[in-house]
Image (spheres, rainbow, N blue to C red):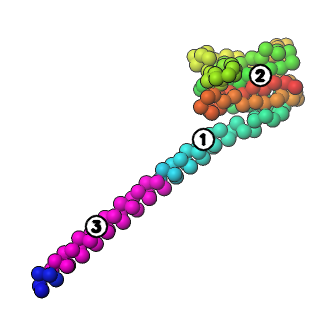
């Protein structure tokens, strides 16, 4: 009788230990899934915040002074280009890095930097009325965002309307 009682206690102890280990493993797996979900959500929020400064330029019409302010703000940004098309300069001028605007079917080059080492354009030229690059502060410009194949904002295009 004593041996049977001891055997039952040992069996119950083993059963409880296995149940406890199973519960811990289930909780750990659940916590892992929750952590992965939280990391993905955090990455999405981080991407949105990093690109929030560009949303004001997404298909809007802005003034020439806002164009020059954007140029001042982003001119030193790495892997980034701004193209300004004015009434006098229909071909446009790149500031910072020139970007590929090749959007042919299946092309993943759209929005990519053509030559990262070339820094183009001078901010001072947008202020000189004698030059074709002059940006009229009261002029109206259509703003467009340029994203690469990874959906990263690589540039802005401002076209005078």
Q: Count of labels shown?
A: 3
- Give percent across and percent down for residue 69: 75, 31
Task: Please tell me how crowded label 2 is: few (under 14), some (14-19), or many (20+) other residues with Cα within 10 Å.
Answer: many
Q: Where 138 falls versus 52 (above or below)?
A: above
Q: Is residue 124 visible?
A: yes
Report helix, strand or loop for mark 1.
helix
Q: Which mark lies nearer to you, 3 or 1? A: 3
| Range shown magenta | 6-34
Q: Is residue 72 visible?
A: no
Residue behind mark 2 = 84
Residue at 72%, 28% in the rendered image? 156
Residue behind mark 3 = 18
Report helix, strand or loop for mark 3.
helix
Residue behind mark 1 = 47
Residue 108 painted magenta: no
Q: Where 121 falls versus 158 (above or below)?
A: above
Residue at 56%, 49% in the rendered image? 41
Does label 1 or label 2 sit earlier along the sequence? 1
């Amino acid at each position: 009788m004593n041996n049977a009682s001891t055997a039952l206690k040992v069996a119950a102890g083993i059963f409880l230990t296995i149940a406890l280990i199973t519960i811990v493993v289930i909780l750990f797996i659940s916590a892992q899934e929750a952590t992965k979900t939280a990391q993905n959500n955090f990455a999405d929020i981080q991407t949105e915040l990093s690109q929030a400064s560009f949303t004001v330029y997404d298909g809007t019409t802005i003034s020439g002074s806002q164009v020059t302010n954007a140029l001042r703000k982003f001119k030193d940004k790495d892997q980034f280009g701004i193209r300004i098309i004015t009434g006098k300069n229909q071909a446009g001028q790149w500031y910072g890095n020139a970007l590929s605007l090749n959007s042919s079917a299946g092309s993943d080059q759209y929005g990519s930097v053509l030559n990262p080492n070339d820094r183009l354009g001078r901010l001072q030229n947008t202020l000189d009325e004698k030059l074709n690059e002059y940006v009229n502060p009261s002029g109206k410009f259509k703003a467009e965002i340029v994203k690469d194949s990874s959906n990263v904002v690589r540039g802005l295009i401002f076209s005078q309307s």
